[in-house]
Amino acid sequence: MSRFLLAVAAVVLVMASLPADAQRLPNLEERVADARDRVHRGFRNGDLTRNESDRLHSDIDRVERMMRQARRDGVATKGERRDIRDELAYIEREIDRLMHNRRRR
């Protein structure tokens, strides 16, 4: 019985030492994927020009780099998450603006 408790305690210690949610930014990852999908759809259906699409993709790439940097040390701080969230909100507004600016390819 004591070996079992010792093993359980060891597993709990190992699990607690791993950066759980810091490695993932689930809501932000979903928003990045949605933004990338919207840009693809917008370009495919002609709502975005090639230049607009390329610029938005480079903006999304920059957010993904920010996310990797935030995860690098195993802890995404509140400030890092806020910066990523703000940048992503800006990109989402840009996607809306550019998709509805009446420019067609």
Image (spheres, rainbow, N blue to C red):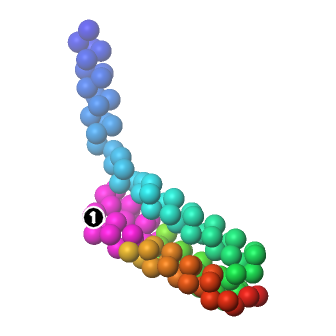
The extreme top residue here reads 1
Asked whether residue 18 is in view, the answer is: yes
Q: Which residue is mark 1?
A: 78
Q: Residues within 10 Å of mark 1 (few under 14, many from 20)?
A: few
Please determine whether, in this image, residue 105 is positioned above or below residue 86: below
Residue under the point 57% across and 63% down: 33
Residue stretch rendered in magenta on the structure: 65-85
Q: Secondary structure at mark 1?
A: helix
The spot of residue 26 in percent (x, y) is: 45, 54
Q: Identity of the amino acid at label 1? A: Lys
Q: From the viewer's side, name the closer residue of 14 and 76.
A: 76
Quarter of the image for residue 58 reads bottom right
- 95 drawn magenta: no
- 74 drawn magenta: yes
Please determine whether, in this image, residue 31 is positioned above or below residue 100: above
The spot of residue 76 in percent (x, y) is: 33, 61
